[in-house]
Amino acid sequence: MTKDSVHHSDLRAKAPSLAAGMAAADHGPDIQLAQTRHRAALVASWDITPGSTILELGCGQGDMTAVLAEAVGPTGRVVATDVAEPSYGAPVTLGESAARLSAGPLGSRIDFRFTTDVLDPSVEFAESTFDHVVLAHCSWYFASLAQLRDTLARVRPWARRLWFTEWDLTPASDDQLAHLLAVLIQGQIEAAGSHGQGNVRTPFSREALLRLLPEAGWTADGSRPVDTEDLQDGDWEIAACRDLTAAHERMAALPEPLRQLVLSQTDVLQAVAKPRGNRSLPAYTVTAR
């Protein structure tokens, strides 16, 4: 067994303690543990060694940030960026979660930078500043695929390797159809110009990402499915979709043909979704150089 494999095994074992250190664990410890375990398994499968430097885009409340900080060890560094304000998020804001992490044992390894868009010319790093750039379950927040492509192109000189994870639009089983419908409905409403602050703004397929990477200067060298069995995101997006389609102002802004299509799709969602415990879509991870 290699030193790195021992380190990665330790990372999975540390998921409970990492989860307990998150501010959101105060509100839902089991949920936080499932989210942290998912990310620990991801990072354990990546080639991230102690002492590494990482640029994380779309860090949000730091679920992945904490795992990355554990992976790089005391001599490593994670620069965690997000375009959102520190006041964004509920029941715990981004700022509150970052403050908890910064005050804990991993704090010295993390540099949180909120309200930071790497497309802003004022944001600049020297070539090869980072060993890795990470985007984990954040790319559907982008306003468009063009914005994602430009972002990946901007960070290309700064990092040697890309680790990318997102939900897969291709369901593996029928009980994932409700999550898929909720995602597609939200994506259609956003694409029609009725914009909100939800998690889903530009849903795209794994194949679309693989077509986009060469345009941004990256060469994919691996892709595999990721287990999401214990994650609750399916329920969350179904609830968000129901709230969205019940919002009169957002729906009224849609062209009438699209509004009727969305309403019909929402009828189907209501028929196939369970009150709770809906199975989340699968996810995938792509590595690139």
Image (tube, rainbow, N blue to C red):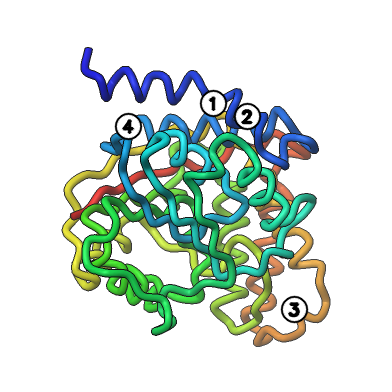
Quick one: 82 or 272, which is closer to the camera?
Answer: 82
Q: Is the residue marked by circle 1 packed among few (<14), some (14-19), or many (20+) residues within 10 Å?
A: many
Looking at the rendered image, the disc whose residue lies closer to the viewer, 3 or 1, is 1
Q: Helix, strand or loop at disc 3?
A: helix
Q: Identity of the amino acid at label 4?
A: Ser
Of pointers 4 and 2, the one earlier in the residue sequence = 2
Q: Quick check: marks 3 and 1 in contact, CB under 8 Å? A: no
Query: Residue beneath label 2, please?
Result: 33
Amino acid under label 2?
Leu
Point out the tag, 3 or 1, that comes first from the N-terminus: 1
Q: Residue 253 versus residue 90: which sits nearer the camera?
A: 90
Q: Spatial distance from mark 4 to mark 2, Cα to Cα?
A: 18 Å
Residue at numbered disc 4: 45
Foreground: disc 4 or disc 3: 4
Quarter location, residue 227: top left
Q: Examine the rendering and report whether any part of residue 187 can be seen.
A: no
Measuring from the top left, give residue 35's x and y in whole percent: 58, 36
Residue drawn at point x = 36 percent, y = 25 percent: 8
Instruction: Report crowding for label 4: few under 14, some 14 to 19, many 20 or more residues within 10 A (C-alpha).
Output: few
| Vertical position of residue 175 compared to residue 155: above or below | above
Which residue does the numbered mark 1 point to in the structure image?
15
Quadrant of the image for the C terminus? Answer: bottom left
The residue most toward the top is 1
- Please give the name of the residue rendered at 77% of the width and 54% of the height, measured from the top-left corner: 90
The reply to whether callout 2 and callout 1 are in contact (CB within 8 Å) is yes
- Earlier-in-chain disc, 4 versus 3: 4
Q: Position of residue 81 (x, y in %)?
A: 50, 62
Badge 2 density bin: few <14, some 14–19, many ≥20, Cα 10 Å: many
Residue in the image at 46% along x and 34% along y: 70
